[in-house]
Image (cartoon, rainbow, N blue to C red):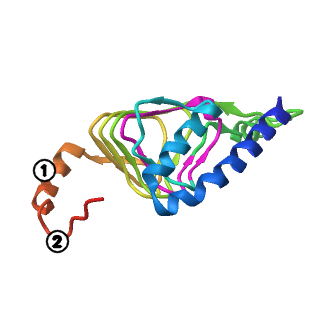
Amino acid sequence: MKVKRILKRIVFHTQKKLILTIAYFNHRLYMKFYVPLLEKQGMKFNGTPRYIGAHVEFDDFNLITLGERVVVSDHSHFLTHDYSITTAEIARGVIPKNDIALVRGIEVGDNVFIGKKSIIMPNTKIGNNIIIGAGAVVRGRIPDDSIVVGNPGVVVGKLSEQAEKWKKYMDSEYIRKD
């Protein structure tokens, strides 16, 4: 089983490298190749993601589900495993023969922006209409219409309220439309 997983990873990263250069020139074209590659690995999509950075790391693909219009910025990580259970067992005086991982899935809803270098922990369910700030470490359930920042990730506001504040910028020099 472990050998099969390693071989599957090697094939994935080889194929990803072939399409990686496209990302630097046209991210929409890159996504047309990258999403099917992720699906082939077992990732589930409930819609079409807007963008997944070229340097995003995914653990067990088959335990990750992404919704409609999801943006995942570069160098973010989706961790579906937690080996700290081995450390906890040793602290209890139980010496396991092998390392032990607690493996659980991740679900991301619709219209979610995940900022650069964020870490999404196992057993996390992110609702709809959410911004995860850059560098946030997110775990647990994140309710709809939230803004999450920090380590650990904390809900600091409602996206709908922030959108109202940003309306004043929509026709300004500060807006770039891609």
Magenta region includes residue 38? no
Q: Which residue is mark 1?
A: 164
Residue 100 picture location, percent across and down: 77, 33
SS class of the residue under badge 1? helix
- In this view, 102 is above or below 20: above
Q: At 32% across and 34% down in the image, what residue appears?
A: 128
Q: Residues within 10 Å of mark 2 (few under 14, many from 20)?
A: few
Residue 177 picture location, percent across and down: 25, 60
- In this view, 53 is above or below 3: below
Which quadrant is home to the C terminus?
Answer: bottom left
Q: At 59% across and 30% down in the image, what residue appears?
A: 63
Q: Please identify the quarter of the rendering in which residue 143 is found.
A: top left
Please provide the residue range marked out in magenta: 56-77
Q: Nearer the viewer, residue 119 or 97?
A: 119
Q: Is residue 152 visible?
A: no
Which quadrant is home to the N terminus?
Answer: top right
SS class of the residue under badge 2? loop
Disc on res. 173: 2
Separation of disc 1 and disc 2 at Cα? 18 Å
Q: At 17% across and 71% down in the image, what residue appears?
A: 173
Drawn side of residue 50 relative to residue 129, left or right:
right
Drawn side of residue 145 relative to residue 88, left or right:
left
Residue 59 picture location, percent across and down: 64, 40
Q: Residue at the right extreme?
A: 97
Q: At 59% across and 56% down in the image, what residue appears?
A: 20
Magenta region includes residue 58? yes
